[in-house]
Amino acid sequence: MKRIILFTTVIGLTAMLPAFGDLIYSNATADSGVTAAYLLNYGNVVSDTFTVTNPATVSEVDLTVWTDPGDPLTNVDWSIGTAAYGSDVDSAVSAPVTTESVCGSCQYGEYDVDSVAITGLDVSLAAGTYYLTLQNGLTTSSGPLLFWDVSYGPSLASINGGGQIPSETFELYGEAPEPGTWMMVGSALLALGFRMRNKLLVTG
């Protein structure tokens, strides 16, 4: 009976923990995918800020990009740093997965505006402000027409050689437990440990 109680207690505590895959940060707005975008080729590098209020581990970056019709994104250089265009936290060349097409015709003509996901990441962040930077995007045809969609959100974006630009469209997913959650779990486990110890002393 004691084992059943212990098992159900541990299961209950586990259920209190946050699920992996939480939305950590969103820079998507109603303007995403319909107004403008910035080129990620020909030496152009675009960097945009994001802030996490608690420690977090990023496992996925979702982006909105514009490409020529039927010519999806295949590779892009990304980095996360503590300064614009920085890579002191992490960086890699990734092959994003196109998840859906947002629209086929936008303000500047015919483009596929795609939602893409860079997955399999393991980027640990302390609370603070960081920069997500993209460059050297390639499409199926290795063509240069690849653009990062503008969101006109609250973040501070810039392009190398061109200064500040409107913010870009992206979201970060991963694990971002609330400090209060860990305190509750820790307190509960501590109380359970004292209770089991006392029982052992009494029955011993």
Image (cartoon, rainbow, N blue to C red):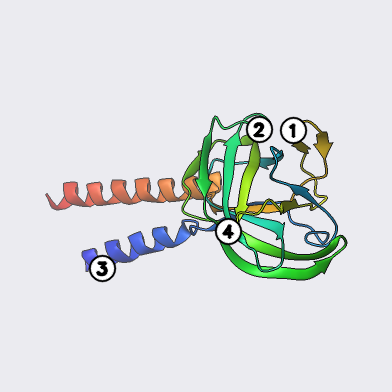
Instruction: Tell me which label, 1 or 3, sits earlier in the chain.
Output: 3
Question: Are circles 2 and 1 on residues that touch, CB within 8 Å?
Answer: yes
Question: Are circles 4 and 1 on residues that touch, CB within 8 Å?
Answer: no
Say which amino acid is labelled 1. Answer: Asn
Report which quarter residue 135 is drawn in: top right
Q: Residues within 10 Å of mark 1 (few under 14, many from 20)?
A: few
Residue drawn at x 51%, y 55% as measured from the top left: 119
Determine which residue is flagged by label 2.
Answer: 85
Say which amino acid is labelled 4. Answer: Ala
Secondary structure at badge 1 equals loop
Q: CA distance from mark 2 to mark 1?
A: 8 Å
Image coords of residue 40 (percent x, y): 69, 45
Question: Are circles 4 and 3 on residues that touch, CB within 8 Å?
Answer: no
Disc number lying in front (4 or 1): 1
Q: CA distance from mark 2 to mark 3?
A: 54 Å
Say which amino acid is labelled 2. Answer: Tyr
Determine which residue is flagged by label 3.
Answer: 4
Image coords of residue 8 (percent x, y): 33, 66
Disc number lying in front (1 or 3): 1
Q: Quadrant of the N terminus?
A: bottom left
Disc number lying in front (2 or 3): 2
Instruction: Tell me which label, 4 or 2, sits earlier in the chain.
Output: 2
Instruction: Say above or below: 194 vs 114.
Output: above
Q: Which mark is residue 117?
A: 4
Disc number lying in front (4 or 3): 4
Determine which residue is flagged by label 1.
Answer: 160
- Residue 126 as seen in the image, left or right of residue 149: left
Image coords of residue 160 (percent x, y): 74, 33
Instruction: Tell me which label, 4 or 1, sits earlier in the chain.
Output: 4
